[in-house]
Image (cartoon, rainbow, N blue to C red):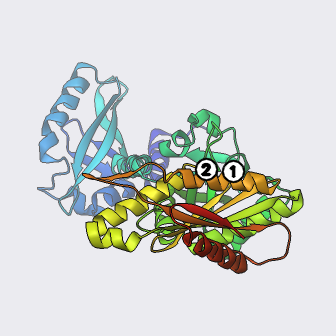
Amino acid sequence: MMKDNSQIEQSIYRLFEITPIPVVLSYPSGKLEYVNPAFNKMLGYEKEQIYAEGIVITHHDDISVNQEVRRQLIDNPYSPVTIEKRYLHKMGHAIYAQLNIVAQPDTEGNVVRYISQLVDLTTIRKSEAAEVLLNHLVNQSNDAIYVVDPKCGDFLNSNHLGYSRLGYSKTELLTLSVPHIHPALQQAGKWQQHVDDIKDNGSQVIESTHNRKDGTAIPIEANISFIEYNGADYLIAIVRDISRRKQKEKEVLEKANLDPLTNLPNRRIMEQKLSQMFSKVEQRNQFIAFIYIDLDKFKAINDTYGHTTGDGILKGTANRLKACIRESDIITRLGGDEFLVVVNGFKNEEQIKLMAGKLLAKFDSPFHIEHITLHVEASLGVAVYFGNNTDVHTLIQLADEAMYQAKQVSGTSIYYL
């Protein structure tokens, strides 16, 4: 048995009552006939309040939009109209919505009412705005930001800096996993251990290096968090390039270990390098020469010409000695006008004598300090190590004694001990 029209309308009204979508029925004059609870809720009204005289629900700046809608409905009453407009909340603020309106005819084709359905765009636009803001902030960040699958380490997303700093396009990066740029995590079990550590702590800050596409490495500091979102697990990594910080740390360390005047390594660095040198020559059955160098009559130069000239002589001496040795050899300023050169890799003592003579020859030419030209002589003492178990301090002392023996000879001289 077919339901009559009144039964059908009652069913439709009941549907309007429970739907979460705002619905409005209005007369051809524009007066409200019915609004459902969802519409009341959108504009902040309670039940019958919205039907009271003087209630305005269209934002005053969009009255012209109402006029345009009415014009379209008059021209084509049965063509649906979709338009965006602002409504006025009970508290006075605007609600941005999409209006979808269509005419309902009677059996003779006359307009009985208009049926309107609204979509609240305020929440949608706020959500979109939040996403735009988030994307902007992420892409403008001074740090690389990655979303990673904790199961296998695959990159799921990255901001612009995240892939460009590594030399990849975004498409290329998203075909890789973290172990590709962090080789230490390629070892069996390392990735899972890494993830477990982060998960146990909730987050972790680490210092490491990342490999670029071209194979070069950059030092990084990564703040990694383990999160759950919509039932799935993710790692979020905020990664900072710390190249400049590491360079500054290196410079500070170098300054702390260098003689401030000559920039030669200090005694502590010399002893570290000597330990490495000893182990190498013992394996190769080679000699090490300790050459102690002292500038003759340096105090008289300082007293006569001043400390600026004296400092110039010391820096010039350091540069001349450095020009004679290899990177594997050692040169240091022991203090005052005394220097120590340690040269390795000699097969016999004759080679050592040739090296000492080469160093001494550097004092044949005069020093030019500002407008002053000075001939400076030096005394060299040489002690030799050849697997004889003599410690470093003894060898330096022996070379020092040999240097004092050389000072007994007039002019630039060498003494071998």
Would residue 367 be found to the left or right of residue 190 on screen? left
Residue receiving disc 2: 358
Q: Nearer the viewer, residue 139 or 243?
A: 243
For the point 83% across and 66% down, the residue is 386
Q: Which mark is residue 49?
A: none
- Which residue in the rendered view is the most extreme toward the front? 410
Q: Secondary structure at mark 1?
A: helix
For the point 55% across and 46% down, the residue is 158
Marks 1 and 2 close (CB-CB < 8 Å): yes
Would residue 254 be found to the left or right of residue 102 on screen? right
Q: Residues within 10 Å of mark 2 (few under 14, many from 20)?
A: some
Image coordinates of residue 190 in percent, x first then y, are 80, 61
Which quarter of the rendering shows the C terminus?
Answer: bottom right
| Kind of residue at badge 1 | Leu
Q: Residues within 10 Å of mark 1 (few under 14, many from 20)?
A: few
Image coordinates of residue 162 in percent, x first then y, are 53, 46
Image coordinates of residue 179 in percent, x first then y, are 73, 50
Residue receiving disc 1: 354
Does 389 appear above or below 368? below
The quarter holding residue 195 reads bottom right
For the point 81% across and 65% down, the residue is 279
Mark 1 to mark 2: distance in Å?
Answer: 6 Å
Would residue 300 be found to the left or right of residue 223 on screen? left
Q: Secondary structure at mark 2?
A: helix
Q: Nearer the viewer, residue 54 or 325?
A: 325
